[in-house]
Amino acid sequence: MDNENKLLVLSRDSGHYAQLVEELAFDGLDIVHADSPSHAKTYLNKCNIILGEPSKIAPVIHGAGRLVWVQSAWAGVNELVKPHIRTDYTLTGVKGIFGPMMSEYVFGYIFLLERHILEMHAHQKKKHWQPNTFRTLQNRLLGVAGLGSIGRHIAKNAKQFGMKVWGYKHASGTVDHVDRVFTGNQFNTFLAGPEYIVICLPDTPKTRHLFNRASFDVMRKEAVLINVGRGSVVSERALIEALNENRIQGAVLDVFEKEPLPEDSPLWEHPDVLVTPHVSALSFPEDIVKIFAENYRRFTLGRSLQYVIDFAKGY
């Protein structure tokens, strides 16, 4: 089967990806690479496997006549699970590598807020010696919305800081490092407790604007929302209203309904918002190629692939 396989790498880092795959020396695997959809069109009809970024793959996927398998380089596969896009192939995602990076991001910002780091830096610039009080994370309650591999990793790290953890997920069941798991119509009960709520949810019809005016109404006034999942999960209009009316304390946002975040968005200059440009975790080629390599070995042996995406669910 190896001599029939042709891989198209479609990514802004396509050359790097291709080099890493070539170094694995898979017998019979022919590799081509492109850094744009227009460039990729040259190779589409010859390739049965694509490795790359969903946003670059989606515009050309209907032209891939031999396509059997796509390995996404991103955790989010929104562009490949939209209505009316083809689903007659196996799509595999990424798990196990973004959890540590996103956890670093989440707790970096929690410590930034709890230790008043920005305020202390402002005092430093003014040469003011002004000690601040702070609270530890011991026994504080963290809520994690979405208990996939990323959410579970954040919960595990929260426990290392002595925090209590609540989690919200689609299906019931216990989860390691999570004290209470909420599902379905228990969402408002879940929201009412934590001081920090971290969103790790995918973009699906059920999650879009899950965080809306009603959601912010039941959250604690001291609550801080941290979104490292998908921007579509939060109604930005409702969030801004909640912040302006002091119904929640603040927000740390790495993802948005529209990206890049428009220059006229009030979120840029809101005093209670910290904005980052979708960088809580990055796809490093070395990590993604390890996942591709294991899946390719399975593919050539006719075995089930890891991290297969359910097109109906979107994850």
Image (cartoon, rainbow, N blue to C red):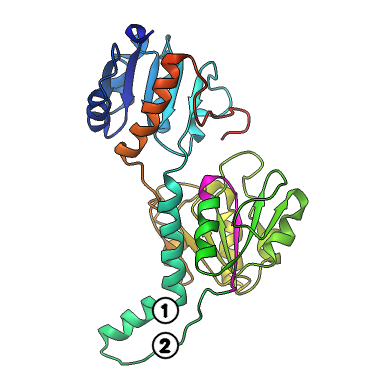
Q: Classify residue 246 by image quadrant.
A: bottom right
247 over 158 or under it: above or below: below
Q: Residues within 10 Å of mark 1 (few under 14, many from 20)?
A: some
Three-letter code for the amino acid on which mark 2 is drawn? Asn
For the N terminus, the quadrant is: top left
Residue 306 at x, y percent in the picture: 49, 29
Q: Which segment did they paint magenta?
A: 139-150
Pick whichever of labels 1 and 2 is earlier in the sequence: 1
315 over 207 or under it: above or below: above
Task: For the residues labelled 1 and 2, say whether their Cβ atoms are less than 8 Å apart.
Answer: yes
90 over 174 or under it: above or below: above
| Residue to which mark 1 is pinned | 116
Question: What is the CA distance from the residue labelled 1 to the residue labelled 2?
Answer: 7 Å
Q: Residue furthest right?
A: 185
Apparent side of residue 311 relative to residue 71 in the rendered image (left or right):
right
**Residue name at image x 53 percent, y 28 percent:** 308
Residue 58 is covered by the magenta coloring: no
